[in-house]
Structure formats: structure tokens, C-alpha cells
Image: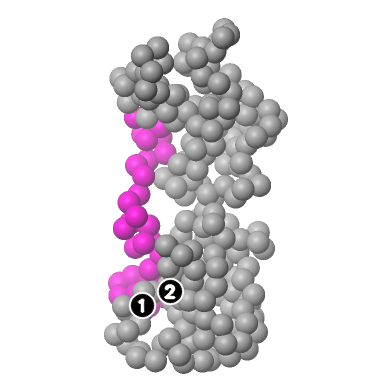
Amino acid sequence: MEARTLRQLIEDCREDLDDEVGPFLWSDELLTKHLNEAVEEACIRARLLVESSRADICRIALKAGQAEYLLHPSIIVIRRVVLGDAQGKPLVRTTSAALDGVCRDWRSEAGRPEYLVRDRQSRTLTLSPIPSEPSELMLTVWRVPAADEVMEGDDDEPVIDAIHHRKLVHWACGRAFMKKDVERSSPQEAAMQMGVFEEYFGPRPTARALQELSIDPVTGTQPNWF
């Protein structure tokens, strides 16, 4: 299946919205916003972007004595983390509560990192033990499009596989039909379009579900191989 450009996707939206002749009821800018939103939603629901190669997203330089590091904003779930020397097992993804139960000094102990705790609110990860020497973390993650992958120009394409492109139109049309305006609003059409999108990409995971995907089962103190 051939990839769809932003311009083609906007035209697809206008066809489904019966808005092909100007003056248009929905602007190109609004449909572009909804289409970019659709790509992000698809990635969250169907985990379409598995990343391990982009250095700006999946490589973190470690400094001796520093435990906390900022994560790239596109990361949804960290699936696997290893130290740059590639020796030993992946770091264990866990929680501060779990570490409190097995090691009182995990916040101050220094050495080779074995555990990581993610704080979704601050978009950081904390390592334990605290690195005692410089190194590098190598991450495998699920993510949404980065800022440089957002569609803006007519020839831009969604970053996800082309087979999914046409399905993005359902989200954009659903959002368009939600406009609080008598001429453009159609709750029934909005629900139908959103239903088709969800049937294809799946339901949106809850915040709790995403948190659980970020912790190694069962207790968060044993590694889970990706």
C-alpha cells in the first residue's frame, strides 16, 4: 500500500466530511491538527513505533554521581534498558515503593546501575545504584512521533507504516464532527468515526495500564525480557 501525504489525507477527510467545495466548513489547519493527533493516538493504542536506534531518544549519557536523567518527551513506555557496554542483564524496571522494600539505601548507594524508576510526571528516570563512573544507557521504547515528525507541509507523510494511513482519517473526521457549531456538529457521525478508529487501532490504554507496562512483573524486582 502506498503512503498518503498530508494533502491526500486532508482530501480524504473532506470527501468523508462532504466538504469538498469551498468555502470549506473545516480549515486545512484544523484537519492537519486532527490528523497529527490521530497518528499519536494510533501509536499509543497500537504501539506502532518501537524505537531503539534514534540516539536522541534512546541514548542517555550517564555521569558519575548523577542518579536522575530526563527522558525524551516522545517516550510512552520504556521496554528494555541496558548499559552501553552491553554486559550483564537489562536493568530492572521497578518502582520506588518496590525498592524501598528491598533496599533502604537505594537512593544513595553508588555502583553499577541495576534498577531504574520512571517518574511519568517529571519525565525522568532514576537509577540505582547511582552510577559510579561515566557510561551510557541504551533504551528500547514505545513512543509517539517526535516534534520533527509532525506533519506540516503538503508532502509530509505520517511516520507510521503506510498500511495504517487511511485509517487516520476516521479520527480526524470524528474530531471534526465534534465541533460545537450547528452546521458542523454531528454527534452520531462523530461516534461512528471514532468507533471505526478504535476498532482498528484498539482502545486507549489507561494511565495505570501504561504504568504497569513500564514495570517488570510480578513484583517489579525481576527482569522482563523484551
Magenta region, residue range: 195-224
- The verdict on residue 202 being magenta is yes
Q: Residue furthest top?
A: 21
Quadrant in which the N terminus appears = top right
Q: Height in image: 168 above or below 205?
A: above
Q: Secondary structure at mark 1?
A: helix
Residue, disc 1: 96
Q: Name, please, the residue furthest toward the front.
A: 181
Where is residue 51, by image quadrant? bottom right
Q: Secondary structure at mark 2?
A: strand
| Above or below, comparing residue 15 to residue 127 in the picture | above
Q: Mark 2 sits on what residue?
A: 117
Residue at position x 61%, y 41% in the image: 150
Residue 214 image point, x, y percent: 41, 64
Please name whichever residue, 103 or 3, is drawn nearer the observer in this view of the structure: 103
Query: Relative to 102, is 181 above or below?
Result: above
Residue 55 in the image, given as x and y percentages of width and height: 67, 63
Of labels 2 and 1, earlier in sequence is: 1
Identify the residue at image location x=37%, y=40%: 202
Residue 89 visible? no
Disc 1 marks a residue whose amino acid type is Ser
**Residue drawn where x is 56% and y is 82% of the image:** 66
Q: Amino acid at mark 2?
A: Val
Contact between marks 2 and 1 (CB within 8 A): the answer is yes
Crowding around mark 1 (Cα neighbors within 10 Å: few <14, some 14 to 19, many 20+) is some
Q: Is residue 154 visible?
A: yes
Q: How many C-alpha atoms fall within 10 Å of the one at disc 2: few (<14), some, or many (≥20)?
A: many
